[in-house]
Image (spheres, grey):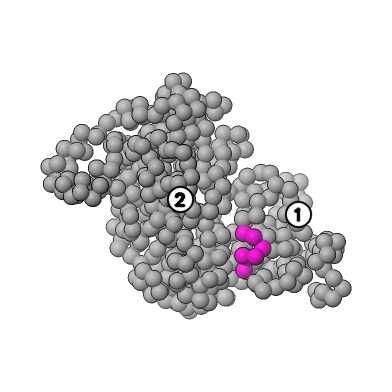
Amino acid sequence: MAEEIRQLCKIDDITALYAKKLVSADEAVKTVKSGDTVHYGLFCGIIQDLDVALAKRTEELENVLVCDTIWAYPQTPAILLADPDSKHFKYMSTHMSALDRKMNKEGRCWFIPVQFRENTKLWAENVDSIDVAMLQVGPMDRFGHFNLGPQIAEYWGIFSKAKKIIVEVNKNQPQIHGMQNSIHISQVDLVVESSNNKLPNLVAKPASEVEKKIAGHIVERISSGSTLQLGIGGMPNYVGSMINESDINDLSVHTEMFVDAYVKLYNAGKITGNKNTHKGKMVFTFAMGSQEVYDFLDNNPMGCCGPVDYVNALEVIAANDKVISINSCLQVDLFGQVNSESAGLQHIGGTGGQLDYVMGAFKSQGGQSFLCTPSVRQNKDGSLESLITPRLPEGSIVSSPRSATHFVVTEHGAVNLKGKSTWQRAELLISIAHPDFRDGLIKEAEKMGIWKNSSKVL
């Protein structure tokens, strides 16, 4: 492949090859056959025009498996609108957006459980085939390279397995600096010029009062010189706001997801990138947020997007000192098991890289990971339900095992579970539960044999 690319360095040859491979979206999807496995791309690189074109062929096709990672567009995939009973297409994802969750509940989207750092190997070595890989890219440069946009993640595992690769060229894809961040025209089978659809615009809701209290318990434990990993949402953004108003500075970024909070921290002069690895760079494996995120990263040499099997590798995370990992969860039981994926049997989200950063941050010199949840949620009937539970309910998914959990945070405080016995963990977790539920949790802990007379009384 390197020799082929070298021989195609002449601009005339590259231009001619582009023209030879350029087809319409309708023509490109003719490569899909019944029984094929098709990959739709990742995050902001998921195809749109090709999806519409493939939907036109619904009645011609049977048993086509379609995979992606987070459908973040506001509209339902065209193939599912054309095939509401999933008779022709089976849609699967390694992570879940709000729309994916809705489709999962309707029986039209299936989840692929995986640790995010393993996604590259998953596609390269653990699926039988990917017959057609489709993805959005930026326009080809004069050397024949298409920039992959604000996501690399597991792309190279997908490419290594794909029999055919089709790129949908979108001028709105920002040009992102980083590692393995482009694919060459010689590696592509077909090129489609898209209608230049906009990228997903994810604007986090303002932080609630509970989330602000949670953020306060975290920020007081962050010091200058830390390396940040933040998730998306009102609470992580509020953490950024609180840091902006503090004397914390000289921060770095090593994260799976690049979000708006980092732009605000950079604009406030808080980010220097003075960490152990990739000095001066803000390292991530995908970016999603408002248009401000994409504009900030466009041709910005400080941005460094890399493959997920590198960015989320525990030893790579841990090579940076004072890693601070902040993620949300849904429930925590008295053993310290953390559920971030389901409400009983109701699927909510994917595994993602939460465990990667829980473990990687703890391995870091001076590192801390924080898993955050409100102490209660309100049910439809107005009643309150404790999210600190004696045991995880039936159907719950253990996203972070008790052996990995470091800090758990609610609006009532932050507790460090590392090195604590089972009864100490129960005591600490009950101390940050909602006051109305603490007595009941103590009684349940006694029944479970993890709250003895020798335990400290709260």
Q: At which x and y percent is residue 458?
A: 80, 74
> Which quarter of the figure has residue 225?
bottom left
> Which quarter of the figure has residue 388?
bottom right
The residue located at (45%, 46%) in the rendering is 125
Residues 439 and 350: in front is 350
Residues 238 and 71: in front is 71
- Residue assigned mark 1: 384
Task: Identify which amino acid the numbered label 2 is placed on.
Answer: Lys
Q: At which x and y percent is residue 426?
A: 75, 67
Which label was assigned to residue 121? 2
Task: Identify which amino acid the numbered label 1 is placed on.
Answer: Leu
The residue located at (20%, 49%) in the rendering is 3
- In the image, taking residue 350 as reference, residue 56 lies left or right, namely left
> Which quarter of the figure has residue 300?
bottom left
- In the image, taking residue 140 as reference, residue 320 lies left or right, namely right
- Please give the range of residues in magenta: 400-406
The residue located at (38%, 58%) in the rendering is 306
